[in-house]
Image (cartoon, rainbow, N blue to C red):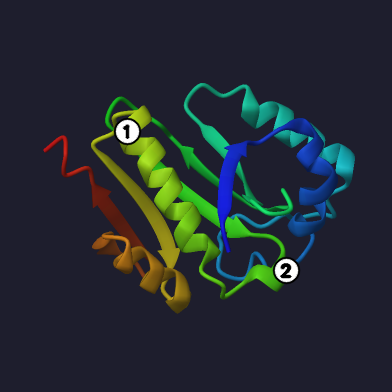
């Protein structure tokens, strides 16, 4: 299944607010909504994050249908690094390799467009499928705590 990423836009709130209220999506994350997220709350959140200069947020979409199915982003962007995040909100697409494809697209963007030296991420140790995707994509473990692994991917073209 082919996908593409595009910049997140305000109208995405009409879909993504539903994902933010689904506990299955947030089972492996530290940052969970602590209240019911309405379309208005989600729209305001999207407006806020799109104003940030040190973040690049993207929608993950299915090429054939243009269906918006998840988000991926780079946050805490500096001159040489950024933190990677991803989730697939449409559960019917879980386990289909879409996260790995989206990861490849964001790596390409980070290294070719932003010229970053490395990308890092935090992943729950229990999220075995995600860890496998990250390792298969070249990430390696740099540290860990009781709950999470910190992983990194270096841009070998800038080293």
The answer to whether one can see residue 89 in this image is yes
- Picture disc at residue 112: 1
Other-residue count near label 1 (Cα within 10 Å), few / some / many at <14 / 14–19 / ≥20? few
In the rendered structure, the answer to whether residue 10 lies left or right of residue 32 reads right
Residue 54 x/y as whole percent: 47, 26
The numbered dot on residue 70 is none
Tell which circle, 1 or 2, labels the residue nearer the N-terminal end: 2
Q: Which of 8 and 4 is in front in this view?
A: 4
Which is more foreground, mark 1 or mark 2?
1
Q: In this view, does 151 lie above or below 53?
A: below
Disc 2 residue crowd, few under 14, some 14–19, many 20+, Cα 10 Å: few
Q: Does the image show residue 24?
A: no
Q: Is mark 1 on a helix, strand or loop?
A: helix
Task: Give the x, y percent position of residue 116.
Answer: 29, 33
Q: Residue at x 41, y 57 (%)?
A: 122
Relative placement, left or right, of 24 versus 41 is left
Question: How many angstroms separate mark 1 from mark 2 (CA)?
Answer: 35 Å
Residue at the image point whose x is 37% and y is 45% from the top: 107
The residue shown at (81%, 49%) is 15
The local secondary structure at tag 2 comes to loop
* Residue 145 % position (x, y): 34, 66
Q: In this view, does 52 lie above or below 3?
A: above
Does residue 93 appear left or right of residue 22 in this picture?
A: left
Task: Quadrant for the N terminus, please.
Answer: bottom right
Q: Nearer the viewer, residue 8 or 141?
A: 8
Residue highlighted by disc 2: 23
Residue 111 vertical position relative to residue 60 in the rendered view, above or below = above
Q: Quick check: 48 left or right of 148?
A: right
Q: In the depicted view, which residue is nearer to us: 30 or 112? A: 112
Residue at 26%, 60% (x, y): give it. 138
């Amino acid at each position: 299944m082919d996908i593409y990423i595009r910049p997140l836009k305000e109208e995405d709130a009409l879909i993504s607010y539903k994902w933010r209220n689904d506990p299955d999506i947030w089972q492996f994350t530290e940052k969970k909504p602590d209240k019911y997220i309405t379309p208005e709350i989600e729209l305001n959140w999207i407006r806020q994050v799109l104003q940030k200069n040190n973040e690049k947020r993207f929608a993950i979409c299915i090429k054939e249908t243009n269906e918006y199915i998840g988000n991926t982003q780079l946050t805490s962007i500096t001159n040489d690094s950024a933190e990677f995040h991803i989730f697939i909100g449409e559960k019917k697409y879980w386990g289909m390799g879409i996260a790995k494809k989206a990861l490849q697209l964001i790596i390409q963007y980070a290294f070719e467009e932003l010229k970053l030296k490395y990308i890092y991420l935090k992943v729950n140790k229990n999220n075995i499928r995600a860890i496998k995707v990250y390792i298969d994509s070249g990430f390696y473990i740099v540290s860990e705590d009781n709950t999470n692994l910190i992983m990194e991917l270096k841009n070998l073209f800038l080293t």
